[in-house]
């Protein structure tokens, strides 16, 4: 069936599920949700305590709707319009993960196996005990910033992954935009759920030095601020960084328990070796991070490590040389 025709089926089934079947939530997933051109099977995810009753009611939908198969939490029907209807039942707790699982194509879902395989490689080849996932926050539309609702889903997804993977831990994080007034780009109830945050400036580079400094200090006053990302915003050979009072920001970071990063991206290498040295001398630890936008960029860590060495940093000054149990308390302010 053409997707355009499936639109009508979707509306009718959704209405029936919500009004006649007593489900708390019903949401279309699968090929339809991914807007595939031709739909052979339309799938819904429903939240219910009584799946057998949902099945019974659907069988009587439109006179009679033949039930082709049923298991614990999934049932398949044949609709008179010629396509299959699949219903997955789930609980409130598993809703987010079920949406992802139900929406990803089989191919995507197999990619999950690849993800876990890739993570194990990070452990065995690089000796990593953990990896932080730091997508851009919502305001950064050009960089496909993640809306709050999707970050909630990602958080639950990572929880599930962590339960299934041994040997490496996935840290829930985000690169949170520091807005013009120094506030952070996610609400606090969401920030609280993250293992740590990287907060950075991506706009208003032209603010006067005092204003830019105040903006960063204000951001650091947020208790969910952990690491200042690419502190100066410089791009080597392209643009200088924005101006701020380095000494004041380092001192504020020290007082508030905030940290800096050495961003390993070859065109950033930000902090500079000079500033990294100053921060470490003040007792502020530094994360050496890849800023990797794909797995191909993990190797860039080399550039950041070189920079840290030029800054004369000892292992004790580098946040991510610490095991997670030791590191985690540093992120709770
Ligand atoms: Zn950034």
Image (cartoon, rainbow, N blue to C red):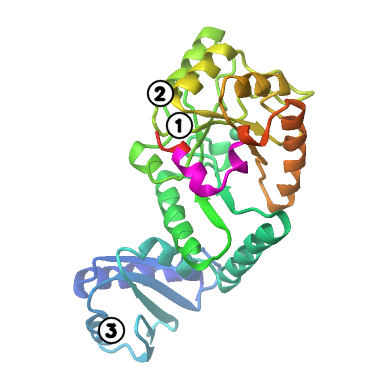
Q: Spatial distance from mark 2 to mark 1, Cα to Cα? A: 7 Å
Question: What is the secondary structure assignment of the residue under circle 2?
Answer: loop
Asked if residue 301 lies in the magenta stretch, the reply is no
Specify the quadrant of the image occupied by residue 225. Answer: top left
At mark 1, the secondary structure is: loop
Q: Nearer the viewer, residue 82 or 209?
A: 209
How far is the residue under mark 2 from the one under mark 3?
A: 53 Å
Q: Which residue is mark 3?
A: 55
Image quadrant of ligand 1 equals: top right
Provide the residue designation for mark 2.
221
- Numbered disc total: 3
Q: Does the residue tagged 2 have its C-beta within 8 Å of any atom of ligand 1?
A: no
Residue numbers of the magenta segment? 318-329
Where residue 296 sits in the image (x, y, percent)? 74, 51
Mark 3 or mark 1, earlier in chain: 3
Residue underneath mark 1 = 225
Along the line of sight, the residue nearer the viewer: 195 or 85: 195
Residue at image location 44% in from the left, 40% down from the top: 329
Counting from the top left corner in percent of width and height, residue 178 is at: 49, 27
């Amino acid at each position: 069936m053409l997707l355009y025709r499936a639109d009508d089926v979707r509306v009718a089934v959704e209405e029936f599920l919500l009004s006649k079947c007593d489900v708390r939530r019903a949401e279309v997933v699968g090929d339809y949700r991914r807007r595939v051109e031709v739909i052979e099977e339309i799938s819904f995810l429903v939240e219910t305590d009584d799946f057998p009753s949902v099945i019974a009611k659907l069988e009587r939908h439109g006179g009679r709707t033949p039930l082709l198969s049923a298991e614990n939490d999934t049932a398949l029907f044949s609709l008179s319009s010629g396509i299959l209807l699949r219903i997955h039942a789930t609980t409130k707790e598993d809703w987010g993960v079920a949406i992802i699982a139900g929406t990803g194509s089989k191919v995507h879902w197999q990619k999950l196996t690849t993800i876990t395989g890739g993570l194990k490689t990070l452990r065995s080849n690089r000796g990593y005990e953990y990896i932080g996932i730091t997508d851009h926050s919502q305001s950064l539309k050009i960089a496909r910033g993640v809306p709050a609702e999707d970050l909630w889903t990602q958080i639950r997804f990572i929880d599930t992954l962590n339960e299934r993977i041994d040997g490496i831990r996935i840290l829930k994080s985000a690169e949170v935009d520091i807005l013009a007034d120094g506030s952070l780009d996610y609400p606090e109830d969401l920030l609280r759920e993250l293992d740590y945050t990287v907060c950075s400036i991506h706009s208003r580079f032209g603010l006067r030095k005092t204003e830019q400094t105040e903006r960063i200090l204000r951001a650091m006053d947020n208790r969910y601020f952990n690491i200042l990302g690419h502190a100066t915003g410089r791009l080597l050979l392209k643009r200088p960084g924005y101006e701020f009072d380095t000494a004041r920001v380092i001192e504020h970071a020290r007082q508030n328990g905030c940290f800096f990063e050495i961003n390993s991206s070859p065109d950033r290498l930000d902090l500079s070796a000079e500033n990294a040295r100053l921060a470490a001398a003040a007792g502020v630890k530094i994360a050496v991070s890849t800023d990797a936008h794909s797995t191909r960029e993990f190797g860039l860590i080399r550039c950041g490590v070189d920079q840290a060495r030029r800054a004369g940093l000892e292992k004790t000054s580098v946040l991510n040389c610490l095991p997670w149990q030791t590191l985690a308390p540093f992120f709770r302010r």
